[in-house]
Image (cartoon, rainbow, N blue to C red):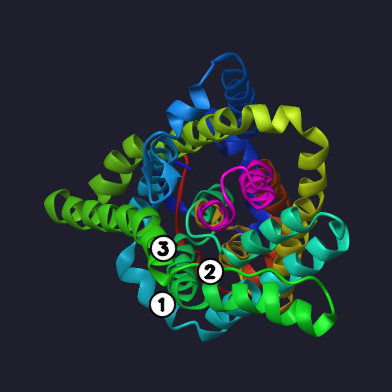
């Protein structure tokens, strides 16, 4: 979204939100489909491309993907008004709902869907359970921004997820792969992953762009003032977020082009529980937050944070524990390939459903929303 400062339209005025988006934002599904196609084509037609792209890695993630993710996240975090984060941290109900959805409901739902829909494919099932444990700390910021969610809330929620991830990922992996299956009489799988491996992923993919975004806003406002920063600088760097997203998608599909096209039935089996997961988590979170009286921007931040997953960590863990050619690694790779189009679709569902939050918006002063002027 662009960065011209303007008052957030009330729910009754949101019927034309999509029409007011820039061409880049409005046609985002077209660009994403094109990026997927280009990536698949490159992966199939250029011999050795996948090996070349994976030759250099950052935290067990291909260097081009790492660069794309950092470029994608930096503009979004540069838009955050960090002095307003205290208002979000004071909203204990919002924080509690997010923690419950991310760390209790999300992993349990993915565990259930994986066993229900993949009972005969233990490797893929394990890979999906690992995806469910890795809560999103990156792309969720893009989806939230596109859907006109609360940027400050999203920044706080992904920071909380990052902290929980370092502490809880290995413990939850042990519980969902060994303890709970044992209680239920199901097959068990061991998972050995170090806390440092998780912390490294968080520091790279959240810490670097977060620090860069904070310094950009702090130094920019100090030098030229907020009006210049939000009306002149942000519109210039804002489009880089979507360019980074599209670049990342091209590289992802190029790396896995051969696997995807040579094993379409396996990909379809893995995609089914993922689609159910994204729909149920996002839809359930939106319904819950609406019932609790959340306003649309906060409901959106909570819902996309709950629905997204940290595919960088999931892929790194699956490859490190089970090997690059394992079924667990394939399930981790298919995760973002399904998540990207699914959550883009949910962005448009959210913008359409914004009207149903009208009662919650009345009586509140609308917060300032930086909308797209690319």
Q: Which residues are magenta?
A: 315-339
Crowd around label 3: few <14 · some 14–19 · many ≥20 (10 Å):
some
Depth check: give the residue in front, 129 or 344.
Answer: 129
Residue at the image point whose x is 56% and y is 68% from the top: 298
Depth check: give the residue in front, 247 or 220.
Answer: 247
* Mark 1 or mark 3, whichever is nearer to me: 3
Q: Which residue is mark 2?
A: 192
Q: Main secondary structure of the magenta part?
A: helix
Q: Which residue is mark 1?
A: 87
**C-beta proximity under 8 Å, tags 1 and 3:** no
Residue 144: % across, % down = 55, 54
Q: CA distance from mark 2 to mark 1?
A: 38 Å
Residue 339: % across, % down = 66, 47
| Relative horizontal placement of residue 162, taking residue 289 as reference (left or right) | left
Q: Which residue is mark 3?
A: 197
Q: CA distance from mark 3 to mark 2?
A: 11 Å
Q: Between disc 2 and disc 1, whose residue precedes? A: 1
Q: Residue 289: in sight, yes or no?
A: no
Residue at the image point whose x is 86% and y is 60% from the top: 119
Crowd around label 1: few <14 · some 14–19 · many ≥20 (10 Å):
few
């Amino acid at each position: 979204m662009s960065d011209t400062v303007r008052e957030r339209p009330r729910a009754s005025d949101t019927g034309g939100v999509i029409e007011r988006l820039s061409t880049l934002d409005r046609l985002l599904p077209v660009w994403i489909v094109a990026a997927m196609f280009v990536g698949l084509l490159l992966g199939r037609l250029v011999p050795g491309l996948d090996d070349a792209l994976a030759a250099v890695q950052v935290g067990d993630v291909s260097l081009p993907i790492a660069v794309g993710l950092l470029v994608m996240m930096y503009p979004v975090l540069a838009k955050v008004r960090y002095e307003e984060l205290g208002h979000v941290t004071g909203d204990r109900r919002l924080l509690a709902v997010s923690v419950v959805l991310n760390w209790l409901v999300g992993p349990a739902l993915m565990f259930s869907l994986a066993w229900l829909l993949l009972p005969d494919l233990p490797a893929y099932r394990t890979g999906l359970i690992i995806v469910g444990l890795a809560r999103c700390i990156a792309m969720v910021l893009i989806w939230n921004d596109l859907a006109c969610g609360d940027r400050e809330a999203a920044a706080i929620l992904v920071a909380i997820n990052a902290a929980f991830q370092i502490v809880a990922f290995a413990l939850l992996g042990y519980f969902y792969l060994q303890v709970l299956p044992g209680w239920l009489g199901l097959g068990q799988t061991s998972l050995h992953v170090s806390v440092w491996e998780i912390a490294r992923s968080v520091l790279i993919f959240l810490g670097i762009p977060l620090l860069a975004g904070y310094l950009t806003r702090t130094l920019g406002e100090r030098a030229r003032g907020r009006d210049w920063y939000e009306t002149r600088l942000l519109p210039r760097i804002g489009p880089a977020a979507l360019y980074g997203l599209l670049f990342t998608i091209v590289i992802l599909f190029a790396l896995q082009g051969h696997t995807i096209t040579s094993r379409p039935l396996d990909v379809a089996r893995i995609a089914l529980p993922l689609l159910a997961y994204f729909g149920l988590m996002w839809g359930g979170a939106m319904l819950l937050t609406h019932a609790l009286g959340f306003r649309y921007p906060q409901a959106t931040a909570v819902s996309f944070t709950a629905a997204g997953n940290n595919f960088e960590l999931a892929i790194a863990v699956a490859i490190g524990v089970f090997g690059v050619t394992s079924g667990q690694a394939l399930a981790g790779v298919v995760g973002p390939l399904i998540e990207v189009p699914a959550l883009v679709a949910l962005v448009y569902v959210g913008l359409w459903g914004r009207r149903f939050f009208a009662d919650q918006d009345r009586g509140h002063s609308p917060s300032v929303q930086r909308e797209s002027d690319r």
